[in-house]
Amino acid sequence: MATLTEELNEWLDEGRERVARLPLEPRVEQIGRVLQVGDGVATVQGLPETRLDELLIFEGGFMGLAVDLGEDAIGCVLLGGASAIPSGSIVHGTGEVARVPVGEALLGRIVDALGVPLDGGGPLETASFAPVEQPAPAIVDRSLVTRPLATGLLVIDAMIPLGRGQRELIIGDRSTGKTAIAVDTIVNQRTSDVICIYAAVGQKASSVVQVIEAVRRYGAPERCLFVIGEANAPPGLQWLTPYAACSMAEYFVERGRDVLLVIDDLTKHAAAYRQLSLLLRRPPGREAYPGDIFYIHARLLERAAKLSPGRGGGSLTALPIAETQAGNISAYIPTNLISITDGQIYLDPRLFYEDQKPAVDVGKSVSRVGGKTQAPVLKALSESLRLEYAQFLELEVFTRFGTMVDERTRKVIEHGRRIRAALAQRQFEPLPLGEEVALLCALGDGVLDSLPLDRVAAFREALGPWLREKMPEIPALNDEAPPLPDETRARLKHALAALAHSLAAPKGEGP
Ligand SMILES: Nc1ncnc2c1ncn2[C@@H]1O[C@H](COP(=O)(O)OP(=O)(O)OP(=O)(O)O)[C@@H](O)[C@H]1O
Ligand SMILES: [Mg+2]
């Protein structure tokens, strides 16, 4: 029986052996020190091997991005903890650029620009990571935008149609319904297979909550992702948000899916970047924005694309939002964004106050790609609409002064008023394609002209159930449906006229 001393010796020998096996090589670790810190940026000395956009780790685990590599110091954008990092503290390099988690597990979640969950729904179960900054697909990897992306808003789908893979700017003064258009488009995807990502940059937390609530209530939240860099977040994190959201979107695009990315909004993104740049003492240019402000937005929006069949055929549609001051679309950031995107939806505050919502100014809005992708059945019906509406708007100005008008002009005006009433739509009530087609038929065939103006909204509301009962082939229409044959159109006109007739009766006697 071994004595206690023997046992102890055995145990000590084992310990000595283990220590002998330990690799006792010298380890070289580069560290830097914080020179200056404040307002979301820090200057770091040391770390001579740092690469551009490398992630640095500060004391306390806070992260920052190396964005300015000087001879003596590194300018760093902090992604958190600006007030908790002491000057003189130690900084470590990571040798890696900022990366975010990507994967199916993100769907239905709310995360920040680093992929940290904000919804209290537990950690993300995803094994893949992607760099925040990625090069845009090359020309050979792209193909033409061919499929429409339905917004469910008649004014857009008929006159400023969007295609999958397009970049369309939503622009307008504050509180003119910009976010509402983007949210309605997301809500409308409940009937499609499009994955929706909403990236909030510099938005009030209360606005973000409203958007999330709306999508949860009316849309398909299990196919949506919210990437939030709200107004209280460090400016570095706000700046990173759209790039991170884009990388998260690209995961799905590369797997052949169609993704819609809303960026709300790039004006606040530009402001966050201006703040960081000025603090990093970069020379200010026009409107105090740094010289590369165009590049940072172009680099982001170029990543939206329709991929070629060889790359899986997925698409990333970008709907960036920009805010104007007093309708000035020729300010620096709006003109930049207009020139980067494939068109813009311009929202007019005057229309908004006149209660014409969505307040889209059709004259100043354009979609440079989407027209080619519009569903043929919708295209055939909406061709004359834009012209008729523009004519009406011009003529209406005259009648404002009480001018006597001839019978023909009066008819154009009455017809135009009905177009305008048909284009007005409440929030969260996107129209399915079939109802858009029926409404355009009703306008084109003059069915609505016999209806009192204040009954047009009721007509639109009654349309869905009426069509399902009388002409179920109309609600069954899809993107690829050819223009309506004459016979179907005649029957549809007949059915719509009957509906209009029943609604024209005094209130309470409708169907
Ligand atoms: N089609 C609509 N019908 C009724 N109300 C609407 C419609 N569109 C927007 N609104 C209302 O108008 C208000 C402003 O809309 P929204 O927040 O979308 O504007 P915004 O341009 O994004 O504003 P901000 O500049 O603050 O971001 C909201 O209260 C919204 O509910
Ligand atoms: Mg908004």
Image (spheres, rainbow, N blue to C red):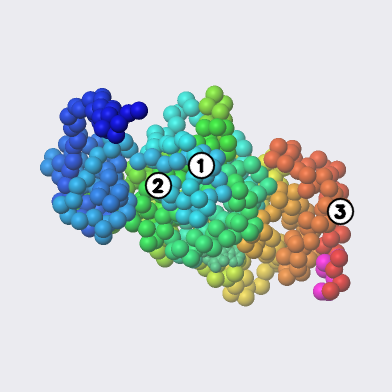
For residue 13, side relative to residue 250 (left or right): left
Q: Tag 2: residue type? A: Leu
- State the count of labels: 3
What is the number of the mark on residue 469? Answer: 3
Q: Tag 3: residue type? A: Glu
Q: Residue at x 49, y 45 (%)?
A: 124
Give coordinates of residue 371: x percent, y percent. Answer: 59, 42
Residue annotated with mark 2: 114
Classify mark 3: residues with Cα within 10 Å, few (<14), some (14-19) or many (20+). few
Q: Nearer the viewer, mark 3 or mark 1?
A: 1
Give the vertical position of 7 relative to 153 (above or below).
above
Give the vertical position of 374 relative to 347 (above or below).
above
Q: Secondary structure at mark 2?
A: loop
Looking at this rendering, what residue extends furthest in the front direction?
1
Q: Tag 1: residue type? A: Glu
In magenta stretch: residue 474: no
Give whichever of discs 1 and 2 has the lower sequence position: 2
Residue annotated with mark 1: 125
Give coordinates of residue 304: x percent, y percent. Answer: 48, 39
